[in-house]
Image (spheres, rainbow, N blue to C red):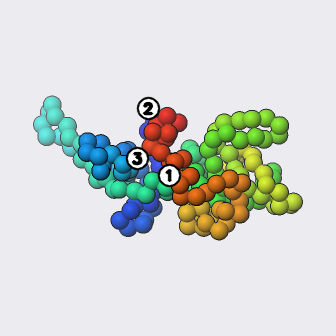
Amino acid sequence: IMIQMYRTKAIETGEWIIGYIFRGYRDKDVKEKVFIVPENYIETYSVDEDTDHLTMKVVEVDKATICENSSIVDRLNDDIYEWDIVKCVTGSKGLYLVRYGNYSFCGGDYFGWYLEGKESTMGMPFTRPITSECYILGNMFDNEEVANQLCMGDLSEEYLCERNNIDYRFFMI
């Protein structure tokens, strides 16, 4: 079983964290919050022959910044995440925003990972399937001006929070 990895910003520090997301439960205040278990903070230890324990650290995150791992790496072998800004070096060269969902390409309609941006020769809006023939330049949360130029749709905080709804995420996995 593969558990999907995510990258998101911690509310307390504003730092990017990679790990596993989950929603709070029990009381009303916590149910609205989203947390991440950083990938390097999960430990198991044995109490005796028959009993194992699991400990983990959890961090509350800004749900508008949740970025799903695409399971694709760039030319430098870095993981590509949703909302990354990439520069493609083959095919339709240009700057693109990494997206996930429905898109059109060459007259067909598809669902999955794709790139949305402006093709460099004509500067026209363009979508294309994701490729590893690119370099990550950053992400839309740290480079909002560039992201707004590349995206053909809404990037408002309201849209991102709705898009990053935890129920939607679990449905997508």
Quadrant of the frame with the N terminus:
top left
How many residues crowd around disc 2 within 10 Å: few (fewer than 14), some, or many (20 or more)? Answer: few
Residue kind at label 1, given as amino acid type: Cys
Would you name the residue on which mark 2 appears? Answer: 1
Residue receiving disc 1 = 161
Tell me the mark number nearer the camera, choosing from 3 and 2: 3
Residue 86 vs residue 35, the one in the foreground: 35
In the rendering, at what x and y percent does residue 15 appear?
A: 43, 65
Q: Residue beneath label 3, please?
A: 21
Q: Secondary structure at mark 2?
A: loop
Q: Inspect the image, locate mark 3, and give the three-letter code of the amino acid beneath it.
A: Ile
Residue 4 in view (yes/no): no
Left/right placement of residue 44 relative to residue 139 reads left
How far apart marks 3 and 1 lie (CA) works out to 14 Å
Q: Indicate the secondary structure of the residue bearing disc 1.
A: helix
Marked residue nearer the N-terminal end (3 or 1): 3
